[in-house]
Image: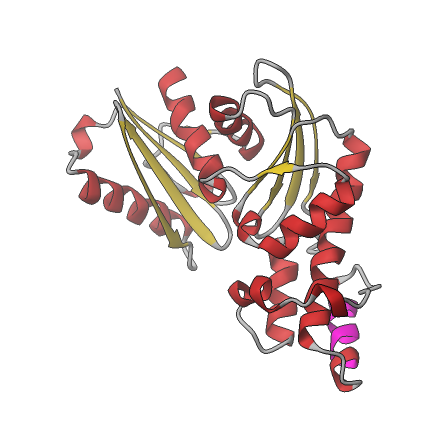
Amino acid sequence: MISIGLDIGSVAAKGVMLAGDRSFKVVLPTGWSPRDAGHNIIEHLLDVSGIRRSEINAIVVTGYGRVALDEADKAVTEISCHARGIAEFYPEVRTIIDIGGQDSKVIRINEKGKVVDFAMNDKCAAGTGRFLQVMANTLGMDVSELSVAEIVEEKVTINSMCTVFAESEIVSLMARGVSKGGIIAGIHESVARRVAAMAKRVGIKEKVAFTGGVALNAGIRRALGRELGCDIIIPDVCQFTGALGAALLGFES
């Protein structure tokens, strides 16, 4: 059986194909059309695998753009997909923290990988990839540069949780000559503080896994671990966890 899982996020679209003992993955910018992004992901996976479209048994889609893809056999929530993806390779995990472009989620799962509780922040950009993007633009940087540019020893506290007010606060800090590296360390701490507060409301049960594209940022990983007071597992395919879970669910549908 061959299954494709798609996770169409607000910033990036991810795809995973599972075909026997082989797997393929690809990530592309979502762009303005989630539907086109999903279609392009499928075409890329077919190209790199050499598998024909007629050989695909299931296509399962999740993420922000899941309602837009008419090629999918099934649409599933990100919460279920992240839980399934983590449970497959990290059965010891009981808490999943996922920070995406438009929202952040904390998911509690049991020993069978079933969701028992969750919380989501999808009303405010604070604590999301979008917050980091806006702050990076304010600093005149690409969001991918934040992790390597931070200077933890010069960290300043960012008091504003609102994206607009935080942006103004950063402009003020730069005008006072505060180092960009110190500001970035403060930004990372601000995101981690917001997400950790949500995690504590749900209840943190170890072990904890961190998924989503933001998990690629070492500064966020450091700050979040300190806020939670525990070690965090970062999956090798943290950005593809949702797509992987979707592909696995394709075998079960």
**Residue 143 sits above or below residue 54 on the image:** below
For the point 54% across and 34% down, the residue is 78
Colour scheme employed for the rendering of this structure: secondary structure
- Residue 111 lies, in percent from the top left, at 61, 14
Picture quarter with the N terminus: top left
Name the side, left or right, on which 150 lies relative to 60. right
Q: Is residue 56 above or below residue 126?
A: above
Q: Residue 204's quadrant in the figure? A: top right
Quarter containing the C terminus: top left
Relative height, residue 116 to residue 34 (above, below): above
Identify the residue at the far right of this view.
Answer: 159
Q: Is residue 8 left or right of residue 212?
A: left
Q: Is residue 39 magenta?
A: no
Q: Main secondary structure of the magenta part?
A: helix
Asked whether residue 193 is in view, the answer is yes
Number of numbered markers? 0
Which quarter of the figure has residue 244? Answer: top left
The percent coordinates of residue 197 (x first, y second) are 80, 42
At 15% from the left edge and 34% from the top edge, which residue is drawn? 52
List the single residue furthest toward the front. 153
Q: Is residue 166 left or right of residue 44?
A: right
Viewer-nearest residue: 179 or 238: 179
Say whether residue 217 is left or right of residue 173. left
- Residue 245, given in percent of the width and then of the height, sits at 46, 29
Q: Residue furthest top?
A: 112
Residue 253 appears in view? no
* Magenta-tinted stretch: 164-172
Q: Position of residue 126 (x, y in %)?
A: 72, 55
Residue depicted at x 61% and y 58%: 130
Rendered position, 14 above or below 88? below
Q: Quadrant of residue 148?
A: bottom right
Task: Please tell me whether residue 165 belongs to the stretch shown in magenta.
Answer: yes
